[in-house]
Amino acid sequence: MQRQVRLDGVSAGYPNRAVLDQLTLDIPALTTTAVVGPNGSGKSTLLGVIAGVIQVTAGKVEHGTDKRVAFVTQRSEVADVLPLTVRDAVAMGRWGHRGLWRRLTRQDRDVVETSMRRLGISSLAHRQLGELSGGQRQRALIAQGLAQEADLLLLDEPAAGLDATAQRLIADVLAEVAGEGLTVVQATHDLEVARSAGHLLLLRDGRLWGEGDPREVLTGEAIDEIWQLRPRA
């Protein structure tokens, strides 16, 4: 198994609140890893640690590549303070390649258009991001992540609260980009999405409860233990 990310004894959290507790795990390259667990289990914190936006308090994080990591959160604060169009927001994904003040090249613009098209938002290109529905905005943020052309794409509940059509579209796009050689890691509450992943990380109370093939890890017994808090034998 080719490894994309390795966590070794990692602990992390926030001021006065520890979240992750000595996590040791591997994230394989070139597939989709689903991160599942109850609220408060540490899914978002784990993504933040992998992305480098949350510092570890113990242990170490090793990446298999030096290429940029793309991190798609559930909400972008930028949209609340800047009058961005959808195209502007997606084009921000090219800043890591071009810099903040340099003009986009034709190749950059092609990447932006392709990313919007994949998420079905080309017709929204001139709309203000802040005017969009939650589902439309989320698709724009995922398109921004794709436009970064990173080796590793991290997503925090990318389809949360969306209708079935939008969920299916996002799932299909993530499967496509994983098939094209991108490593995808997504936190999700959707067990069907988790079961369709190539790899699964099951968290509870900031600790790793299970890891591996979703069909082997996400059993009925494990679900009962994790979500109904049955004691582990």
Image: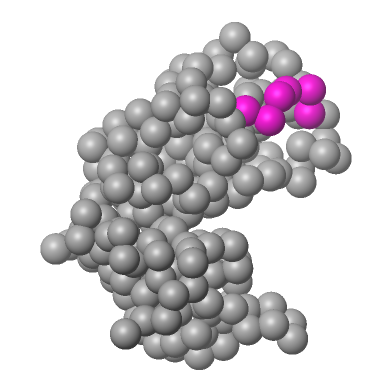
Whether residue 133 appears in magenta in the rendering, the answer is yes
Q: Which residue is most to the left? A: 1
Query: Looking at the image, which is closer to me, 25 or 216?
Result: 216
Query: Looking at the image, which is closer to me, 85 or 15?
Result: 15
Q: On the image, which quarter does residue 5 sit in?
A: bottom left
Can residue 119 be seen in this snapshot? Answer: no
Rendering coords of residue 177 (x, y %): 32, 36
Q: Residue at horizontal 25%, vertical 36%?
A: 180
For residue 233, side relative to residue 76 (left or right): left
Q: Residue at horizontal 54%, vertical 51%?
A: 156
Query: Looking at the image, which is closer to me, 88 or 213?
Result: 213
Whether residue 122 appears in magenta in the rendering, the answer is no
Rendering coords of residue 36 (x, y %): 44, 59
Q: Residue at horizontal 40%, vertical 65%?
A: 224
Can residue 198 be seen in this snapshot? Answer: yes
Q: Residue at horizontal 14%, vertical 63%?
A: 1
Rendering coords of residue 154 (x, y %): 46, 52
Give the tally of numbered discs: 0
- Residue 139, relative to residue 1: is it above or below? above
The magenta segment is 130-135
Q: On the image, which quarter does residue 178 sit in?
A: top left
For residue 166, side relative to residue 126 (left or right): left
Q: On the image, which quarter does residue 173 sit in?
A: top left
Classify the position of the C terminus by image quarter: bottom left
